[in-house]
Amino acid sequence: MQSPEPTTGPGLDDVADKSGEAFEWLVGAPLQSLVAVVLGAVALAIARWVISRAVRSVVEGGTKVRSHARRLLMRTRIDVGGSDALAIARRVQRAETMGSVLRSAAGLVVGIVVITAIANINDWDLGPVLASAGVVGVALGFGAQTLVKDFLSGLFMLVEDQYGVGDVVDLGEASGTVEAIGLRVTQVRDLSGTLWYVRNGEVLRVGNMTQGWSKAFIEVLVPPGSDVDQATALLRGAVDELAADERLGDLLLEEASVTAYEDLTAEAVTLRLMVKTAPAAQWEVQRELRARIRSGFEAAGVPLALPRREVLVEREVTGSATGTAATSGQDQRSSS
């Protein structure tokens, strides 16, 4: 007897077809989208790791170079000095700020690429979305012009190294020591202790008093009848004494320039002293020089010119020996 052939019902065929379609759909757009997201995450992680390494190398590079140079110069017994804490803080802040900007930019670029890839895989129509985003972007652009200006100005300030932490700057209405620099605002502490928050976009000019080197500037007034050559020699002697000082001598970077007759009036002759100093050391050098100049002038018997002030007083004079009244514009002057 011949056995009957097995038959397949129509329900099993439908299930198999649907399973195949589901498998094809799963390995199609969803899997490709997942792969795009994973690749984007990996790319972002690699980009941030590279940026972090670059920032770390910038921060630590200066110290390593100085250490290597110090080891090489030890054979010649040359003292290269220690690290400047303010310079290190300045370099660290610049590097970290630039690293933060680069990491944010990397995340934005990778995100846009991943979204574009997913849209292409799933055949999404991004035309209406882009049009709406363009309208919103224009509205936000008009409303956030000041914020964008502040960020761009802060970025250029950091790239150009216009000033850093510890610098004494003049930003117009705010002057003092820079305590922190951000992409949007700069914090400046003035002499009275007030902390000013200056928006970077409003900084039209920057006067940096402590970048690279500074200069001590002193003017001395002596009477016209004094020995100007002797006074000039006393100024040079005060600078020479300061240069020989163990504590302050290293703050002087060049020989001083001492000049006479910078100004000449009936009351005084102006002498001028200028010397190049280490950054932010000009005020300490000026104070010490003024003290030494005063002591030297007193010891040599050279007087300092005193400022004079003339006051004009008009009085009405009445009465005379003949009994007639007369008015005269008699001037009475006094000096102090």
Image (spheres, helix red, strand yellow):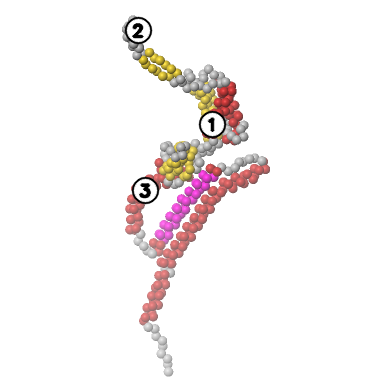
131 or 295, which is in the foreground? 295
**How many labels sit on residues?**
3
Q: Which mark is residue 287?
A: 1
Q: Earlier in the sequence, mark 2 or mark 3?
A: 3
Q: Is residue 171 magenta?
A: no
Q: Quadrant of the N terminus?
A: bottom left
Q: Is residue 102 magenta?
A: yes
Q: Residue placed at 32% from the left, 6% from the top?
A: 323
Q: Which x, y percent locates residue 150?
A: 41, 45
What secondary structure do most residues of the magenta stretch adopt? helix
Q: Residue 198 location in percent, x, y?
A: 42, 42
Q: In the current view of this chain or complex, which residue is farthest to the top?
A: 322
Three-letter amino acid code at the position of disc 3: Ala
| Mark closer to the observer (2, 3) | 2
Residue assigned mark 2 = 320
Q: Secondary structure at mark 2?
A: loop
Residue 8 image point, x, y percent = 39, 83
Marks 1 and 2, Cα distance to the nearest angstrom?
59 Å
CA gap, disc 2 and disc 3: 81 Å
Q: Residue at x 53, y 53 (%)?
A: 53
Magenta segment boundaries in residue numbering = 88-117
Do callouts 2 and 3 mark residues in contact (Cβ within 8 Å)? no
Judging depth in this view, the residue of 291 and 184 nearest the camera is 291
Q: Is residue 252 visible?
A: yes
Query: Which mark, by number, is residue 258?
Result: none
Residue shown at the point (42%, 39%) measured from the top left: 204
Tag 3 residue: 144
